[in-house]
Amino acid sequence: MNIRLAKTAGFCFGVDRAVKTLEKESENKSISTLGPIIHNEFVVKDLEKRGVSVIDRLDDLASGNTLAIRAHGVGKSTMDEIEAKGIECIDLTCPFVKKIHNIVYKYYSDGYKIIIVGNKNHPEVMGINGWCENNAIIALDISDISGKIDSGEKICLVCQTTMDRHTFESVSGYVTSQSNNALIYDTICSATNERQTEAAEIAKDSELMLVIGGGHSSNTVKLTGICKKYCDNTYQIENFEDFPQNIYIPKKIGITAGASTPAGIIKEVIDKMVENINGAESFAQEFEEYEKSLITLNTRDVVKGTVMSVSEKGISVNLGYKSDGFVPVAEVTDDPSADITKMYAAGDEVEVFVVRVNDVDGEVTLSMKKLEMMKGAKEIEAAFESKEILTGKVIQVVNGGVIVSAKGARVFVPASQASDRYLQDLEAIVGDEVAFRIIDIKKMRGRTKVVGSVKNVLVEQKAALAESFWAGIEVGKEYKGVVKSLTKFGAFADIGGVDGLIHISQLSWSKIKHPSEVVNVGDEVSVYVLEFDKETGKVSLGFKKAEDNPWRKVENEELKVDDVIDVKIVRIVPFGAFAEIYPGVDGLIHISQVADKRIGKVEDELTVGQHVQAKVVEIDLEKQKIGLSIRALIAPAKEEAPEAAEEVAATEAVEEVVAEEVVAEEVVAEEVVAEEVATEEVAAPETTEEAVEAAPEAAEEVAKAAPEAE
Ligand code: SF4
């Protein structure tokens, strides 16, 4: 025979508290309870023997007797009357029920309509209704509230603590669908919930199910209903006298009991089963063993348990104690972004710290965080002594820095220590895993403040990288880098602990106005070393590839003198127009080659962006110059009159001066850039000559592209 007794069978927290208080207080007081303390006549009779009587009305209270309010609670008018009459009172209202009184009283006073999901004849419901002047709508199903709700009406819905979840969800769901201004309070007691869940589980696996409890006990009746859903062979008995006669006793028997059933009755039923049912002796042993197997629990114990269930609110843990423990989500981890439903699952073995035993929620409150913190504290101190590098997750921005969670500790990292560079927005690193060192541990008024530094580790790591970098650097060596920042004169790329400069002229074969036209911060780039200086730590990098040089196309004879090509006018200068042949290769149409007649201004004939056909009249690969002519396509060259030739010569002499001035101006412009680079302490040329070298395309382009001027 296999008999399972529900761990949640018997007195709940509220009833246990009430009965024990009465037992103790009745030792030196005459007490009367307003209604039977619980729905169990055995308990009531036992208390009677101790001098605790039951009265139905306040007026029946014998002079000198102390009044006890039972766990179900009473309405406000009764409490007011007790106070007005100066009656000595022990209020044993269960804290869960008291909480409902407070909700109802507050919202009723604020003008809300109160709905109670429950049985209108149940004393707990009657007591709750007494906190809204008995004006609540009491509903057991939708028909009780149908047509009684206006959509804009303010509604506050609470539930009898022992109500089954299905009824609560059905009624509250209907209220939510009818009103857009409803406050729904799930006030079903967790003890009830757990008892019902466990009863259902046991009933599913039992051939005979016994529910021990009084017929007036609402929660026992509900428990019986739940068990019947899963086990046809379910019997509700108040004691062993009710045990069904002449029934087949199967192998699998399940037992549970209502919240008002004392442990003594459960034991009596079991003992009598042992006497009367052949083979049930083993159950008595099982029960005794079960009781013995329950562990004792004290605050600050560290125990192991099994995860029963995980929700966003926390983790239920079976500890082998008479009640399950609960780890609130805030006690699971410090990380507010953590999803504990993904971190733990039912069946997991966990180690927990006992924060409180039998607290007001009737549960054992546990903490994983405190345990981790206790274990981590030693490791943190050791890491501080040894300067060991730890890792942790940035979980929060606080005043002056961030908090890193590591080894259960909250490590404060000042903003100045959060990186090796200035971080404008600390929120940007929240969620990052970081390596850090403990740089200080302060103990103040019983609290320990741990201070860490990410910068300390980064600086050290970079120094080690830089050392190996400088040992292996050579001109031409290729590196993979990451663009760290952009300035108007180039891009800085981290090539392994050292930042090198890719000058703007090295970024593209075409002329660009800003490095962002080619790269962006965070881009991975392939670069090669142009030059470096170990003493100053400066590295100049090349980025554009020789094979991408557009002059290769010209060299490979894709373009020949006398070719007629389509070009785009990209720039107009006093002595002609520059036209793009390929991206990065421009040719010059001299003013004398723009038309078949003399023209005053190039702009009279051409505009920037215009596409024209031109003939290649000169290619100088060495100087990278190409001369183009539109005139050559219009008419055969005419011999110019001597006067006209002289005029052209004179004009070209002037143009030569102008071209030289343009060259000089652009070189000066490059010098300015070079000076800016030097000012900003980067690897850039510092003299005028170096400036020209550093920006060869810019200076050469004008000189190359003005063949006539030369
Ligand atoms: S069932 Fe819950 S609410 Fe009711 S008395 Fe017990 S602990 Fe309190």
Image (spheres, grey):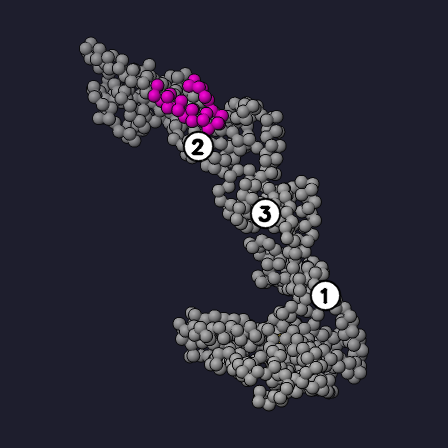
Question: Badge 3: how crowded within 10 Å, few (<14), some, or many (20+)?
Answer: many
Mark 2 belongs to which amino acid? Thr
Determine whether 274 is above or below 353 in the image.
Answer: below
Range of the magenta residues? Answer: 664-690
The residue to which callout 3 is attached is: 412
Residue 671 occupies quadrant: top left
Residue placed at 37% from the left, 27% from the top?
582
- Label 2 residue SS: strand
* Residue 487 numbered mark, or none: 2
Q: Which residue is drawn at 64% across and 70% down?
A: 362
Which callout, 1 or 3, points to the residue nearer the camera? 3
Q: Residue 428: where, in percent of width, then height?
A: 51, 46
Name above or below for residue 419 compared with residue 707: below
Distance, label 3 to label 2, CA atoms, is 34 Å
- Name the residue: 34% across, 21% down: 665
**673 is within the stretch colored magenta:** yes
In the image, 239 versus 364, the foreground residue is 364
Percent coordinates x, y for residue 219 in the rendering? 61, 79
Numbered label attached to residue 484? none
SS label for mark 3: strand
| Residue at x-position 43% and y-position 72% | 154
